[in-house]
Amino acid sequence: MVTVFLGLASNADLDYSAALAAANQPPSTRDQVFVACGEHARKAGRRIREIVGAIDGVWDAHVRVYESVAVAPPHARPGGCILYNPVYMNFLMQRLLIHDGAVAEAMLYAIMAHEVGHELHGDFSASRRQVSSETKELQADRFAGYTLERLNIGIDSITPYYSLAGDEFNGGQTRTGNEHGVSMSRTEALKKGWERAQWNQPEDYQALLEDE
Ligand SMILES: [Zn+2]
């Protein structure tokens, strides 16, 4: 079951209001809350730490992952943090009708790799200010595809879901309107990244701009 990955004990935990209430319990009854890259956060769950650790290993990145206190989509933050919320992730998987644990696991890798891509591409830096949100999203999608190939994780099982999930995670703290790539192009970007890795081409996200 999907829930196992994210540390929720059973199907009973999938009741949204109950899960939300649990997430909003005072810090004293939960793991310690601290501020990470400007957001209230907790230590990430073991499985997520393993996944981000594997992604880090591909790139020798030093991205930190935390559980966000807010029930919000996964996102990257200036300062080298990635935040996710297990309640949100479980409901995302449910909404996508993902019931296969292997597919859910691959989706987690893809989503977290996308967020690592924002960090490694320096998407919060001044030098990237002129790059459109849509381009940054597509470049992060390519990065995710590239990373999954390096980790020997196939993407065929997740492409139908990746296009649907595309609007559920992004690079900024807010989502406004239609700043993400069209869902099909996001899936295409994921595939393109995977293929570039397969052919041992560099990730080279700047040069890939001209491919569009
Ligand atoms: Zn993004």
Image (tube, rainbow, N blue to C red):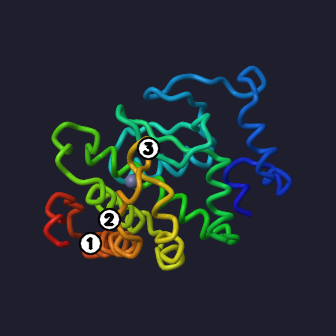
User: Percent position (x, y) of residue 94?
Assistant: 68, 64
Is 57 located above or below residue 26 in the figure? below
Q: Quick check: marks 3 and 1 in contact, CB under 8 Å?
A: no
User: Percent position (x, y) of residue 141?
Assistant: 36, 63
Which residue is tagged 3?
174
Q: Quick check: marks 2 and 3 in contact, CB under 8 Å?
A: no
Q: Nearer the viewer, residue 154 or 119?
A: 119
Q: Residues within 10 Å of mark 2 (few under 14, many from 20)?
A: many
Q: Which residue is drawn at the image coordinates 74% and 24% (left, top)?
A: 26
* First along the sequence among labels 3 and 1: 3
User: Ligand 1 within 8 A of label 2's CB?
Assistant: no
Quadrant for the N terminus in the image = bottom right
Q: Amino acid at mark 3?
A: Thr
Which residue is tagged 1?
196
Which residue is tagged 2?
142
* Cα distance between the residues tagged 1 and 2: 9 Å
* First along the sequence among labels 2 and 3: 2
As helix, strand or loop, the secondary structure at mark 1 comes to helix
Q: Residues within 10 Å of mark 3 (few under 14, many from 20)?
A: few
Q: Residues within 10 Å of mark 1 (few under 14, many from 20)?
A: some
As helix, strand or loop, the secondary structure at mark 2 comes to helix
